[in-house]
């Protein structure tokens, strides 16, 4: 604690000034910590949005290509029934060629869609995992003893400044999973 003189002399005034300074420093440090937290959260969410928007095309491809394949299947079936109607059941080669066209369209759509969906989900999960790791690191930095601005101890600020230069040096340089 601070030494307070009896009678409100110069020691009391000095103690009051020192305590006011510590309180103001604590408020400023808390405001700075809040700003850092807000900025880190905003930047993390912005970056997450950028990564997710870059892989969203894979999802679109995974959804659209089966529809394109289905459209080809419908046109192929129309062609198969047209062939069946014009040549009858007697010529199976013409009918089998039309059915082959139908199967190629269906298969083509699935061959594109399945890997696109698989890659989309793999990348989405890796991005989520990477950002969870980033959030854990942000939380670890905030719970670091050098980030405790609520102590009110006059030497806390000096200790914080001294430790601040070392904060994060033990963190990995690369986010796992990305």
Image: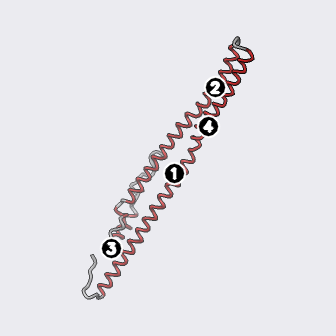
Which mark is in front, 4 or 1? 4
- Relative to 110, is 16 above or below? below
Which mark is in front, 4 or 2? 4
Q: Are marks 4 and 3 in contact (CB under 8 Å)?
A: no
- Going from the N terminus, do you reach mark 3 or mark 1 first? 1
Q: Which residue is mark 4?
A: 64
- Going from the N terminus, do you reach mark 3 or mark 2 first? 2
- Going from the N terminus, do you reach mark 4 or mark 3 first? 4
Q: Label 3 to label 1, Cα distance in Å?
A: 40 Å
Q: Residues within 10 Å of mark 1 (few under 14, many from 20)?
A: some
Q: Label 4 to label 1, Cα distance in Å?
A: 24 Å
Which mark is in front, 3 or 2? 2
Q: Which residue is mark 3?
A: 154
Which mark is in front, 4 or 3? 4
- Going from the N terminus, do you reach mark 1 or mark 2 first? 1
Residue drawn at the location 40% of the way across and 71% of the way down: 27
Percent position of residue 177, x then y: 46, 45
Q: Which residue is mark 1?
A: 48
Q: Is residue 40 left or right of residue 5?
A: right
Depth check: 13 or 105 in front? 105
Q: Residues within 10 Å of mark 3 (few under 14, many from 20)?
A: some
Furthest residue in direction top, as rendered: 90
Label 1 residue SS? helix
Q: Which residue is mark 2?
A: 104
Percent position of residue 83, x then y: 72, 19
């Amino acid at each position: 604690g601070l030494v307070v003189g009896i009678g409100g002399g110069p020691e009391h005034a000095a103690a009051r000034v020192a305590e006011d300074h510590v309180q103001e420093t604590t408020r400023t440090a808390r405001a700075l910590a809040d700003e850092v937290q807000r900025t880190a959260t905003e930047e993390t969410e912005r970056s997450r949005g950028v990564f997710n928007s870059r892989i969203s095309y894979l999802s679109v491809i995974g959804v659209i290509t089966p529809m394109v394949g289905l459209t080809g299947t419908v046109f192929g079936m129309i062609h198969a029934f047209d062939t069946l109607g014009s040549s009858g059941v007697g010529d199976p080669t013409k009918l089998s060629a039309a059915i082959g066209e139908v199967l190629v369209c269906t298969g083509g759509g699935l061959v594109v869609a399945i890997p696109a969906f698989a890659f989309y989900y793999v990348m989405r999960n890796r991005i989520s995992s990477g950002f969870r790791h980033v959030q854990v690191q942000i939380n670890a930095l905030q719970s670091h003893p050098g980030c405790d601005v609520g102590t009110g101890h006059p030497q806390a600020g000096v200790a914080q400044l001294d430790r601040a230069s070392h904060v994060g040096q033990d963190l990995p340089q690369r986010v796992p999973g990305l």
